[in-house]
């Protein structure tokens, strides 16, 4: 899953970058409101962590512009002031959740997981497809109770398919969500990751829909 991190305080931004990456997210970052607004409009993110107090353009203005443009991506706002008025302003501007500084990194990660799950229509912290189970809290994947060993890119592809299970996901969508903005993207590598995953998953679980992309087929519950 791909996240946009918008924070202008260098130390906190670095801490967040490391923690989000360690949790399995692909992270792009911006340290001002102008760049944040641009990235949010042109790149397909699964969620945004957005600081309110930003240089050049404040976070609430950025959020309001995204919503006015019809962007529905989940947004978790960060505020340095524990003020109910500021929280209300953030929610009214279109935020899905908020967190006051200072905060525990575990809480931020939990709130972010919840936002992404709800955006995909999932209520549980675990994503299942038959005997395949992904625990979003630990980024652990098991098949019939046995842990699967996945590379970071294999995990990102599988996680994205699980979040959109039973839907057709295009190659371009997968490319956008497994590579950072400045990475040299190659569509052929998606086929490599799909082929590797097929060797680790039950036969027929990942279906190729000719001309459209891939679908994770899950047996009825």
Image (tube, helix red, strand yellow):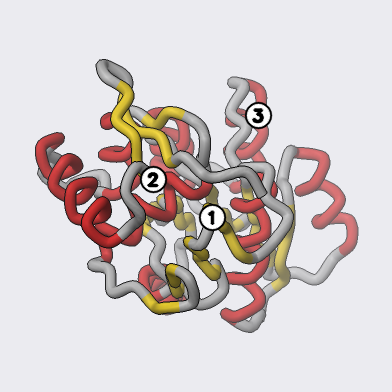
Disc count in the image? 3
Numbered tag placed on residue 67 in the rendering? 3
Residue at numbered disc 1: 130
Secondary structure of the residue carrying tag 1 is: loop
Q: Is residue 211 above or below residue 40?
A: above
User: Residue beneath label 2, please?
Assistant: 205
Which is in the foreground here, disc 1 or disc 3?
1
C-beta proximity under 8 Å, tags 2 and 1: yes
Q: Position of residue 83 (x, y in %)?
A: 85, 65
Residue appearing at x 26%, y 44% in the figure: 181
- Select label 2 or label 3 by which is in front: 2
Q: Secondary structure at mark 2?
A: loop
Q: Position of residue 124 (x, y in %)?
A: 70, 61
Sequence-first disc among 2 and 1: 1
Circle nearer the N terminus (1, 3): 3
Pinpoint residue 52: horizontal percent, then vertical percent.
63, 55
For the question of whether residue 28 can be seen, the reply is: no
**Outermost residue, top side:** 211
């Amino acid at each position: 899953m791909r996240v946009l991190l918008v924070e202008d305080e260098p130390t906190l931004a670095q801490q967040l970058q490391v923690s989000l990456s360690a949790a399995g997210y692909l992270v792009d970052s911006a340290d001002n409101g102008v760049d944040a607004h641009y990235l949010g409009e042109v790149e397909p993110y699964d969620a945004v962590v957005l600081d309110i107090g930003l240089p050049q353009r404040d976070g609430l203005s950025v959020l309001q512009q995204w919503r006015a443009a019809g962007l529905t991506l989940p947004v978790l706002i960060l505020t340095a002031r524990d003020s109910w008025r500021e929280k209300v302003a953030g929610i009214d501007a279109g935020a899905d959740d908020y967190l006051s500084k200072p905060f525990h990194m575990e809480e931020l990660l939990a709130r972010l997981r919840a936002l992404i799950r709800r955006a995909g229509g999932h209520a549980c912290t675990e994503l299942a497809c038959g005997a395949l189970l992904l625990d979003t809290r630990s980024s652990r994947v098991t098949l019939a109770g046995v842990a699967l060993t996945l590379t970071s890119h294999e995990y990102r592809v599988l996680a994205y398919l699980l979040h959109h299970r039973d839907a057709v996901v295009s190659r371009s969508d997968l490319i956008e969500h497994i590579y950072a903005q400045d990475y040299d993207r190659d569509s052929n590598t998606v086929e490599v990751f799909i082929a590797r995953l097929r060797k680790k998953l039950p036969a027929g679980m990942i279906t190729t829909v000719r001309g459209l992309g891939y679908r994770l087929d899950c047996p009825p519950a």
